[in-house]
Amino acid sequence: MNSLSVPRRQMAFFRALRIPTTGITLMLASAGMADDWPGWMGPSRDGVLREGGIVRAISDDGLPVKWRIPIAGGYAGPAVANGSVYLFDYLKRDGEAFNNPGQRATLSGQERLLVLDAATGVEKWRHEYECAYSISYPAGPRCTPTVDDDRVYTLGSEGDLRCLDTNRGELIWSRSLKRDFAAEVPIWGFSAHPLVDGDLLYTMVGGDRQGIVAFDKMTGEVRWKNLDTAAGYCPPTIIEHGGTRQLIVFHPMGIHGLDPVTGRVYWNVPMSPMYEMSINQPVIAGDLMYVSGIRTESVMLRLNNDRPDVTEVWRGEPKQAVYTANSTPQFVDGVVYGTDCNEGCLIAMDATTGERLWTTFEATRPDVKRFIKHGTAFLTRMGSTNDYLIFNELGDLLIANMTASGFESKGRFHVLEPTNEAFGRDVVWSHPAYADKTAFIRNDAEIVAVDLSE
């Protein structure tokens, strides 16, 4: 645990008392202080749960449910910060909602940010606005809210970027990516979870010299923009390697490393996933970075240790590697674990060669156990162990041990029903949040708080 993983309100309190925060951080870590989950993939956006006191297996009796609250539709996972759950959904009023990957549905309704008490589920406040949809798979927003101190940022499916006060829900600033940048809405909607770093907010916009845009997080003013590319669907991320902080951008034309402050290009690797489906955040272990598109598009890169640059190690081939789509893989101890969009199973891959070490449908669709398109399971590593929390498209929460040698299930609990549809089967495609020894999981009808305490 580091100081970033300790809730800011507690760190600010200790600083006010002039108590050294390094010692406090260690004390809180040893006491099992709960992490917040302030945005997509957690406080470090790496899909790792560092909180102690979490159950390590699920018995046949399942897990206790703290509360269930009705909500409306959406793919956006919840965020949790300072005792509040931030849930982004879409309340449809008119129009026919249908899931056709090649056709946009036209709807009218409201995008809503619901803020709930994390302990009880009771609503604290909400922010809602009219938003007509013209997208494919129109259940609702895709982007998890991003909480930063006393502000929360949302990006809706049609490109409404908003900043609100977390205490009262007052709108601080807003931008429309369609109106202000003449950006084309991707067929599956804007999906790049906003990234806040320092005094900037980054998100994909799309267009000439505005593939990615850096905004002043306090005012919404543009600080810089760069890249000639469509928006795609992948959130940007920041790494530090080669003695330099780098903004990593995976877009429909390839992967770029940029200077986060100025937007200047450090390096570029071409890659063009089909249907502009740059979705998954690139994952890094040591000096290796794995970037996956769909079908047979993937590349393993080696980060230069002396300067911001990369070299290619290998590219994906049929029946090799893992081609992830809806869920970001995990890269641990030389192995990449991810759900394959072609076969629909969970695959473990040797990072040095791309060779598949093992496959299983136990994590995705044990009811089917055969090829399915975009079989989905969201993987969250439990600290530095080989145990993982896995939430799959059936609405099941699993705990499993995964190594290069194999997959071992340690129990599962059916949390909620799959309320959406994909390729003729029922699915739920929303990443959970994990905070205060609780899993917060949603579909298109409800959000559920599940007790994970040991």
Image: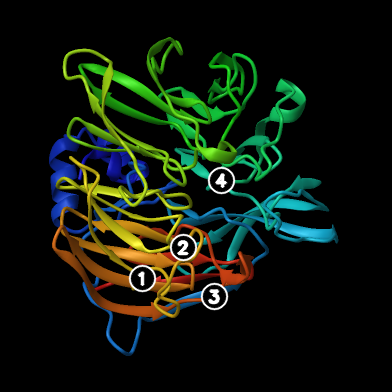
The answer, for residue 153, to whether it is visible in the render is no
Q: Earlier in the sequence, mark 4 or mark 3?
A: 3
Residue matched to label 3: 68
The residue at 63%/50% (across/down) is 141
Say left or right for 60 vs 82.
Answer: left
In the figure, 401 relative to 104: above or below?
below
Q: For the residue carrying disc 4, how many other residues have a C-alpha within 10 Å: few (<14), some (14-19), or many (20+)?
A: many
Callout 4, which amino acid?
Answer: Cys
Callout 2, which amino acid?
Answer: Gly
| Mark seen at residue 375 | 2
Q: Disc 3 vs disc 2: which is toward the camera?
A: 2
Q: Earlier in the sequence, mark 3 or mark 2?
A: 3
The answer, for residue 68, to whether it is visible in the render is yes
Callout 3, which amino acid?
Answer: Arg
Q: Earlier in the sequence, mark 2 or mark 1?
A: 1
Q: CA distance from mark 4 to mark 2?
A: 20 Å
